[in-house]
Amino acid sequence: MRSGTGPIRILVADDQADVRSAFRMILDVQPDMTVVAEAADGAAAVAEAKRLRPDVVLADIRMPKLDGLEVTRQLADQCKVIVVTTFDLDEYVHTALRHGAAGFLLKRSGPVLLIEAVRAAIAGDALISPQIT
């Protein structure tokens, strides 16, 4: 879990390089955030998170090797996991939260909500995309 007062350390896990790059650009310009690693699949995300111990992991729900729900289950005890997806299925939301997710965002939510979700997770709150009903 988070220690110290430095920037929020974030790992971005998504199988699409353009999504990882976009998230990095949005987050790295925030003075209180830094992306410390990227992962293209769930297994790499878990390995990197265990090695680097980020404060927050952004995990796509559909990735090769391990999906975002399994990544959440494996990492939620050691860091805040925010699940990001294009799919607004209630089953995904409920499973993610049951596995300990600190947030659930639709990728179309935009940069402001992404930043707010990271800050909310660090504050101990859970942010769910308002578009999810």
Image (cartoon, grey):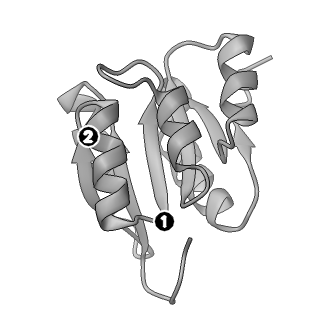
Residue receiving disc 2: 44
Where is residue 89 shown, x and y percent of the image?
67, 10
Graded by Cα atoms within 10 Å as few (under 14), some (14 to 19) or many (20 or more), the crowding at tag 1 reads many
**Compared to 129, does 8 lie above or below?**
below
Residue nearest the observer in this picture, 113 or 126:
126
Q: Which quarter of the figure is the C terminus placed in?
A: top right
Residue receiving disc 1: 55
Where is residue 14 shown, x and y percent of the image?
32, 31
How many numbered marks does the figure carry? 2
Where is residue 39 shown, x and y percent of the image?
25, 41
- Tell me the residue at 65%/18% (across/down): 92
Q: In this view, does 16 lie to the left or right of 80?
A: left
- Tell me the residue at 75%/33% (across/down): 98
Q: In this view, does 14 lie to the left or right of 55?
A: left
Q: Which mark is residue 89?
A: none
- Tell me the residue at 55%/61% (across/down): 78
Where is residue 8 shown, x and y percent of the image?
46, 71
